Image (cartoon, rainbow, N blue to C red):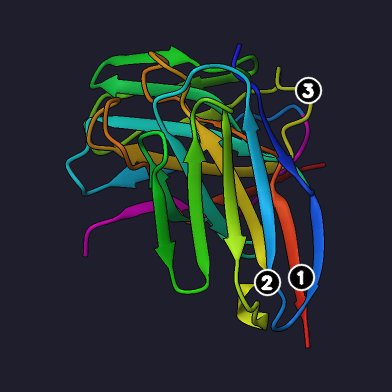
């Protein structure tokens, strides 16, 4: 089955801890994206990557970091510098940044207390 | 800077009725997307509109795009309960390298 997987589905952390969210795709897509969704809001772009070993900041990158060492993987680290980390995080991929479709993973709900 | 605005943000409908959700965007854009999200779930792609006058239909949903007015509409015909969800429009903005800007979403509730 081709698709995007995110793990875990639910994640709980204490304030001050870094946490890494996983995103894997087997669609052979070049472009990958991380979005954040807060209750009652649309999605906001955190980081995106057009190709392996390259990534760019989105609109709300502060307090987050990413890596793209493999084509199929784009993990997101939520650092202790992120002031309001509790949110629903969605990963997406596309054939390229010029592709018409972005395919979304199932999401990870992060709660920080 | 591209901004995307949807209205209404909340919509309560009776089954069998018709209604339209509006999506305005502030700058020239290459593409307009409509997504559906069920509570606690990811986004499901509904439509991608690529050119002025584009119209796409799937079941009881029909989306259209007017690039001159910078407006897209999602029309619901004879609503049924299964259409209850949150609907998002998104646009990429010309030359934005595929990054999507989302509206805040329209939460649709269809009541019997």
Mark 3 belongs to chain:
A
Q: How far across and how far down the image is residue A32, in percent? A: 35, 32
Q: How far across and how far down the image is residue A73, in percent? A: 30, 36
To which residue does mark 1 refer? Answer: B109
Q: How far across and how far down the image is residue A42, in percent? A: 67, 40
The span picked out in magenta is: A1-15
Mark 2 belongs to chain:
B
Badge 2 marks a residue whose secondary structure is loop
To which residue does mark 2 refer? Answer: B84
Residue A21 shows in the view:
no
> How many labels, in total?
3
Distance from label 1 to label 2 (Cα)?
5 Å
Q: Nearer the viewer, residue A94 or A13?
A: A94
Q: A52 left or right of B63?
A: left
Position of the N terminus of chain A by quadrant: bottom left
To which residue does mark 3 refer? Answer: A83
């Amino acid at each position: 089955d081709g698709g995007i997987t995110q793990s875990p589905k639910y994640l709980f952390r204490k304030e001050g801890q870094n946490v890494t969210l996983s995103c894997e795709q087997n669609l052979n897509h070049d472009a990958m994206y991380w979005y954040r969704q807060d209750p009652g809001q649309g999605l906001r772009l955190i980081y995106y990557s057009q190709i392996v070993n390259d990534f760019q900041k989105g609109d709300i990158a502060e307090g987050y970091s990413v890596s793209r060492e493999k084509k199929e993987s784009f993990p997101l680290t939520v650092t202790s510098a992120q002031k309001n980390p509790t949110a629903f995080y969605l990963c997406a991929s596309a054939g390229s940044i010029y592709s018409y479709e972005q395919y979304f993973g199932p999401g990870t709900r992060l709660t920080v207390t | 800077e591209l901004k995307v605005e949807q209205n209404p943000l909340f919509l309560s409908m009776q089954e069998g009725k018709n209604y339209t959700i509006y999506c305005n965007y502030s700058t020239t854009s290459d593409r307009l997307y409509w997504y559906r999200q069920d509570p606690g779930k990811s986004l499901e792609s509904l439509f991608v509109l690529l050119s002025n006058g584009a119209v796409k239909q799937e079941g009881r949903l029909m989306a259209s795009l007017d690039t001159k007015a910078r407006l897209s509409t999602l029309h619901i015909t004879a609503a049924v309960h299964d259409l209850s969800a949150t609907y998002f429009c998104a646009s990429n903005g010309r030359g934005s390298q595929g990054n999507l800007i989302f509206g805040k979403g329209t939460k649709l509730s269809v009541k019997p």
